[in-house]
Structure formats: C-alpha cells, structure tokens
C-alpha cells in the first residue's frame, strides 16, 4: 500500500465496502457521540467520515487529535445505516473504521477556524493565509481560478495564438501608474523596472513577424488599492494580433471571454450581443466608462426644461458655459420616502442634495410632486415626464453643473437606484464595448493639453486628425465593461513613427523625449512595422465576478493587504546593510 493513501477523501463509495484503505488529510472537525469519536477527514478533493470506538487499539491516539491535525489513517470501509446516509457528500454512503492512525503534522491552537463560515478580520486571514486557504470557499475560488486560466489557454490556442513570454526585468516605461524599481548591482545608480504590462514587448513581437501572441502575464504597478484592484501585482490574459482592425479584435476576444462566463458562470445568463457604446454616450447615459448594463436606467440631458425656469439654482447654473442638467429616471421610485433616501445619499457624496420629482395618482389624474415640480410648473414637469417615459409611481432625480464634476456621483446614484428598486438583474452578465475614447484632455487650471487615455493608440483619421482641435481627436481604443467592472482594455496601436511623434508633440513631448522613453519601440517601427492591435483581460477581476466575490483578494492566493503589505511573509522588509552596500544605495529615514 502507498505510504500515505490508497484513495483520496472524495473517492470512496458503497462499492468499496469491505476494503481496507489508507487516507491522509486534515481533521476538519471531531465529534464525540456517546464515546464514539467521529472525524471528518478532509483533503483537497473532499471529505470522508472516519470513526473510532473505545474497543479499537487506535482509540487513545485518536482522542489526542484536534482540528487541523494532518493525519494518516488505515481502516475498513463500512456502509452507513440508511438513516445516516449524507446525500450532500459524494462519500456520504460510507464511513471508515479506524484501525491505525499516525499524526503527520500536529497543529497548535488555531488563530482562525477552518471548519464553518465564521468571519475573521482581513488582517488575520492574510497573516495566516495558509489556514484561510484551507477553507471550503477559498478552495473553491482557487480551483475556479486555475480552471479559468486553463480554459483561457485552450481557447487561445484553438484560435491560432501561440504563447510567448516577455521579460519581467526591463526598462522603466510610464504607462499610467508608478513603476516598481529594481536597483542594478552591476550598474550602480541605475535601475530596472518590473513591467506594468507587456505592452511594448508584445508590440515588438508583432514587428518581429509573429502574427498572433498571447500570454498569461504578470503585471506590476505601485498603485493605491481598491476592492477590485491589487496594489502590487495582477495577472492578465494579454494578446496582440497583426493586420487587424478594431472589429477583428472584438470578434476574436468575445467568444473567449463569453465562453469563459458561460462555462464557469453557474448557469447565470450571459449576454450574446455586446453593444458598442461611445465613451461620450457612456458618460452621459451611465456616468461611467464601465457601466453596469444589468440596470436598465439611462440618464438624459434635460437642460432645456430648466432654462429660464422658476428653479433659480438650475436656471442660474445654465447661464454658465459648459453646464447642463441631467435626469436619472427611477421607475417605481415614486414615493417621498424613497426620494428622501436618495437625497440623503447625495449629501453623503458631498453634494447639497439631489432634486427630484415624483408622480402620483390623486384620484382625478396624475400629479407631479416634490420641490422641483412646484418651482418649474406643470407644463415643464409634464415635458420632463414625457421625455423620460415615466408615469404614475415613478420618479426622476436631477443633478447639474459641468458634467465632469458630477458624472461620477450621478453614475453611483444610478447604481443605487437600480439596486434599491430591484431593477438590476442579478442573474446576468451584461457586456458592452466602450469605444471612441478621446486621446487628449485639457487641464482646467493650466490649459495644458495632455493625454487623457493611452498615448500609443492610433488616432482615428491618422495624421490628418492631429492637424485640428486636439480635444476632438478620438483613438482606436476600447474597453470591455461587465456588470460595472472594466474587464478588458486595448487599442489598435499607433505603429507609424511620424504619427507617434506628432501625437506626443501635441501633448508637449518632443521627439528627443519620445526616443529617450520609448526608444526600443520607436526604432523598431522604422523597419516595416505592421498594423497591429490587441487587448488585455484582467484575470483576477474575471474570477472575482465568476466567484460572486466583492473583493479581489478573495480570488488571489497570496494577496497583499490594503497597505500593500504581505503580513504572512513580512514584506516589504528592511534590506540588510550588506545588500545596500553591494547596490551602492542609502536609505533615507521617512519624512516626519
């Protein structure tokens, strides 16, 4: 017999009754039923009930084991009484009578329980992550992640892509976040960087004549943490293709991502039609470039109804350039109680409040109620109702000003309204491509033009587009949104040096600066670069959605905490003096 096991803890069935078997695993829990000790023995594959009575020679040893002891047991498989069969377990028809037990690894008193679903502080869970990972939910999440990655690889190979690896140690290349720098021992005073993404390398692979590339790529960014973002590193499905248009990229990645959600989505509906929405329309309708389309609410501009109206706040606001009033329709939200709740939400978001109108049946017909309705009068109120397609029992909420100042709050309000009124379809994955991103933006204070989005995107219209108003230049850049999260980001690349130099010149970067920062890629583009484009899909975020988790750390095996610390391994840590001398570095004390 094998030294540790003849079967896993998920293998045994009624067909094994009478066999002598060897199992190894962890003590999930111990139960004493009238002197007979029952142990739920757990391994990576499942649970088997094992037991020992006082007549067994192993009883004294079994009495000593506690939760999370790692043990090996030898015993005989017996059928459970019909009344004691556990249909929830694959092994629920049998149990194993222990004849011999060996403790392979004893366990101290536990800082967190593995059995059960108790809640523990995140700091405790991350410090003792090896225990946390033993829990059933975490085992399920990590297996899901592994299966998703394997499926991604198969799907990409099936589409004719090959997987190539790009460097982990490279040159610093600003791509929207801070680099992690790595000091060079052989070149004192110089630093490598961990790649924020394989962006430049995958473009160079296209220049090198490899038509289709993909990689399950680690990326490193020194970022502030969020619930849906790791503060240090993450993994993405990275791909690039030559001789393609934007639509070709969509047609390639959609069945891959859609197929993943169909395979692992647990029966939830997966949208088959993925709408393409301009960045401008996404901001207007949803207040976000990653809209949750499970919520059917679309915001609308209603400025004309408030211009020169009796509601002085909005009327005066609209006299300023670049301002507008937007309405958030709220079907079934037509009660003063709900309107007051949303007004309180706006105040929590730092606004004075949020105007509203709701429509109610007064017996003799519909009546518009609320402070706004009184101020602007029935004619304007009725025009708003008709524009928004609302009726009795519905409401509308209003925000005004310069769109960039209130869009984000409006988007969050739309989400809250959809949730509270039960309008958001929870049993669905809703996808949309966000397209036509502006390449440039103007700083409101300095008037300086700079890149708003990816500087490596090909401008729509090429060089000709760069001759006019920079703020009107759109890029062949796109994101894929799903249920309020950005899952994919990509672009058709700017592969022509003369267009690239012009694009950077508009943002204030001369040719010399561009060559200094991106010399490898710019030089390569001078030797017959093909048109190319691609995208990257965030694996952590995809698995988070599939696992129905609200925090990305639930689907990463060894994540950092919100302060970018590894409590389990003690990182970041202070270097030894010998290491600093070897690297010719000196550490300054933190600023007080």
Image (cartoon, grey):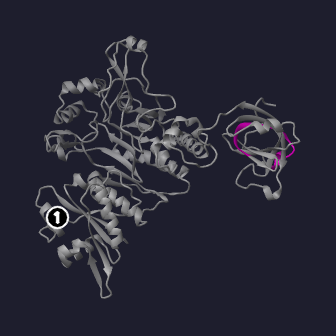
Residue at 47% x, 47% y: name it.
257
Q: Position of residue 298 (x, y in %)?
A: 32, 63
Q: Is residue 99 visible?
A: no
Part of the protein shown in magenta: 14-30
Residue at 30% x, 85% y: name it.
365
| Left or right of 110, for residue 558 | left
Q: Quadrant of the N terminus?
A: top right
Residue beneath label 1, please? 314
Q: Position of residue 248 (x, y in %)?
A: 38, 45
Q: What kind of secondary structure does the magenta stretch mostly adopt?
A: strand
Q: Quadrant of the C terminus?
A: top left
Residue 509 in the image: above or below residue 547: above
Determine crowd level at label 1: few under 14, some 14-19, many 20+ residues with C-alpha closer than 10 A.
Answer: many
Q: Nearer the viewer, residue 592 or 405?
A: 592
Q: Secondary structure at mark 1?
A: helix
Q: Quadrant of residue 204?
A: top left
Residue 39 in the image: above or below residue 586: below
| Left or right of 205, for residue 437 | left
Q: Is residue 234 magenta?
A: no
Q: Nearer the viewer, residue 280 or 258?
A: 280
Residue 192 in the image: above or below residue 252: above
Q: Quadrant of residue 193?
A: top left
| Left or right of 250, for residue 22 | right
Identity of the residue furthest to the bottom in this view: 364
Q: Position of residue 541 (x, y in %)?
A: 45, 44
Q: Is residue 138 visible?
A: yes
């Amino acid at each position: 017999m094998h030294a540790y096991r003849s079967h896993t803890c998920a293998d045994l069935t009624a067909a094994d009754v009478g066999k002598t078997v060897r199992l190894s695993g962890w003590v999930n829990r111990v139960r004493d039923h009238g002197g007979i000790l029952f142990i739920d023995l757990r391994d990576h594959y499942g649970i088997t009930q094992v037991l020992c009575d006082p007549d067994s020679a192993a009883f004294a040893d079994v009495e000593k084991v506690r939760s999370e002891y790692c043990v090996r047991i030898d015993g005989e498989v017996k059928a459970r009484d019909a009344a004691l069969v556990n249909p929830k377990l694959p092994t629920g028809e049998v149990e194993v009578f222990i004849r011999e037990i060996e403790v392979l690894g004893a366990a101290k008193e536990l800082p967190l329980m593995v059995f059960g679903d108790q809640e523990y502080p995140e700091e405790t869970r991350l410090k003792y992550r090896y225990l946390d990972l033993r829990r059933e939910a975490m085992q399920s999440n990590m297996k899901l992640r592994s299966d998703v990655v394997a499926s991604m690889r198969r799907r990409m190979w099936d589409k004719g892509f090959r997987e190539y690896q790009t460097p982990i140690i490279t040159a610093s290349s600003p791509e929207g976040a801070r680099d992690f720098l790595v000091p060079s021992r052989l070149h004192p005073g110089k630093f490598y960087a961990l790649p924020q993404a394989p962006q430049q390398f995958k473009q160079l692979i296209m220049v090198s004549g490899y038509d289709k590339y993909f990689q399950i790529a680690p990326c490193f960014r020194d970022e502030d943490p969020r619930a849906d973002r790791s503060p240090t590193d993450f993994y993405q499905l990275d791909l690039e293709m030559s001789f393609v248009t934007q639509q070709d990229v969509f047609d390639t990645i959609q069945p891959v991502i859609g197929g993943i959600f169909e395979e692992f989505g647990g029966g939830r509906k997966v949208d088959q039609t993925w709408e393409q929405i301009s960045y401008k329309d996404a901001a207007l309708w949803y207040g976000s470039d990653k809209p949750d389309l499970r919520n059917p609410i679309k915001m609308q501009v209603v400025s004309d109804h408030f211009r020169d109206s009796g509601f002085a706040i909005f009327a005066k606001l609209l006299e300023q350039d670049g301002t507008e009033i937007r309405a958030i329709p709220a079907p079934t939200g037509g009660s003063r109680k709900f309107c007051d709740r949303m007004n309180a939400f706006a105040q929590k978001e730092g606004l004075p409040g949020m105007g509203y109108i709701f429509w109610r049946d007064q017996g003799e017909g519909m009546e518009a109620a609320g402070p706004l309705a009184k101020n602007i009068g029935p004619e304007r109120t009725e025009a708003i109702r008709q524009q928004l397609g609302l009726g009795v029992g519905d409401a509308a909420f209003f925000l005004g000003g310069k769109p960039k100042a209130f869009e984000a709050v409006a988007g969050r309000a739309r989400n809250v309204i959809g949730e509270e009124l039960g309008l958001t379809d929870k049993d669905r994955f809703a996808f949309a491509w966000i397209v036509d991103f502006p390449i440039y933006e103007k700083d409101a204070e300095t008037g300086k033009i700079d890149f708003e989005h990816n500087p490596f995107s090909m401008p729509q219209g090429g060089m000709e587009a760069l001759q006019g108003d920079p703020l009107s230049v759109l890029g062949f850049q796109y994101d894929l949104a799903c249920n309020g999260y950005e899952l994919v980001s990509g672009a058709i690349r700017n592969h022509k040096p003369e267009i690239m130099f012009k694009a950077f010149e508009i943002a204030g970067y001369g040719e010399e600066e561009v060559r200094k920062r991106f010399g490898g890629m710019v030089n390569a583009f001078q030797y017959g670069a093909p048109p190319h484009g691609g995208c990257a899909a965030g694996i952590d975020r995809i698995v988070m959605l599939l696992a129905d988790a609200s925090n990305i750390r639930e689907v990463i095996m060894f994540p950092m905490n919100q302060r970018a610390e590894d409590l389990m391994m003690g990182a970041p840590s202070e270097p030894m003096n010998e290491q600093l001398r070897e690297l010719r570095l000196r550490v300054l004390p933190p600023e007080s």
